[in-house]
Amino acid sequence: MTGPVALHGGAEFMPGDEPFLRALLEAGQRLAGDEPVRVVVVPTASAQYEPAAKGRHGVDAFMRVASDAGIEATVRVALVVDQPSAIDPPSVASLRAAHVIHLPGGDPAIVPLILRATPAWHAIVDANAAGAIVAGASAGAMALSNVTWTPDGFIEGLGLVHGIIVVPHFELFDPRGREDDIDRVARDALTPLGLDERTGVIRETPDSWRVAGAGRAHWLPLGGEPVVGRHGDVLPIAA
């Protein structure tokens, strides 16, 4: 098991996402102690879609939620969007010192391709091992599993969680036309985790994840009964 991990269904930083962001800040606060919670937003998945704007959106959202919750926090952006920026010393240092690391959504294919085996990713892994919570939303969440779905097929993910396939925006998911993908998930014994928008799960123990947010989380074990949770519920996710 790695350190604390959170997976989110998308529409991150939008109105209604405050319960999830607050849960991340509270997790970071437990690690930070008397220090301000150090949050780093990593908009790698938006590398081709105005990542700086995505980062600013994340900063604004975290600072607003922290202020409302009375949590002292600093929030910065690590603009890791290509191989050169993945070795940028200030970004790497900020990631290694973070209490909360958030990878927002975008393109699920490019997150592992840009981050894998880079100093930025090693810094994230080191921070996580030291207790920092690593959160991914939509494409960011998909990339944290050991297998990531992309429009062009399945690729190797970053591997902070194992054996699941994250399905974000689950309230909008339509299985029609996805039969081959569904067969692949079953054949590889992957377990789908469907996450509604503005909703996530936060790992508390190796097989215990707490739901945070406005929607529902759907644990869909192969051959078993689906388990659906809402804010505050705990799901028996083995990942």
Image (cartoon, grey):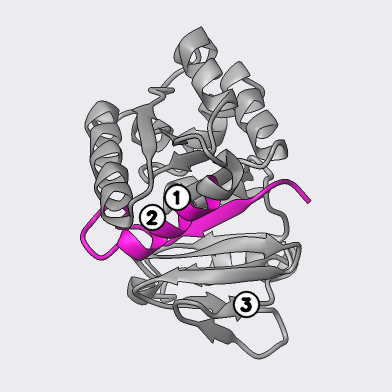
Q: Secondary structure at mark 2?
A: helix
Label 1 vs label 2, nearer the camera: 1
Q: Is residue 81 magenta?
A: no
- Image spot of residue 70 (x, y percent): 33, 51
Type of amino acid at the residue the image marks with label 3: Leu
Type of amino acid at the residue the image marks with label 2: Leu
On the question of residue 85 being in view, the answer is yes
Crowding at label 1, few (<14), some or many (≥20) Cα neighbours within 10 Å?
A: many
Q: Quadrant of residue 43?
A: top left
Instruction: State the CA–CA distance, disc 2 to disc 3.
Output: 19 Å
Marking on residue 21: 2
Marking on residue 218: none
- The residue identified by callout 3 is 235
The reply to whether dot 1 and dot 2 touch (C-beta < 8 Å) is: yes
Please tell me which residue is depicted at 40% across the width and 37% down the height of the picture: 45
Please tell me which residue is depicted at 74% across the width and 68% down the height of the picture: 207
Please tell me which residue is depicted at 32% across the width and 45% down the height of the picture: 62
On the question of residue 154 being in view, the answer is no
Crowding at label 3, few (<14), some or many (≥20) Cα neighbours within 10 Å?
A: many
- Please give the range of residues in magenta: 1-28
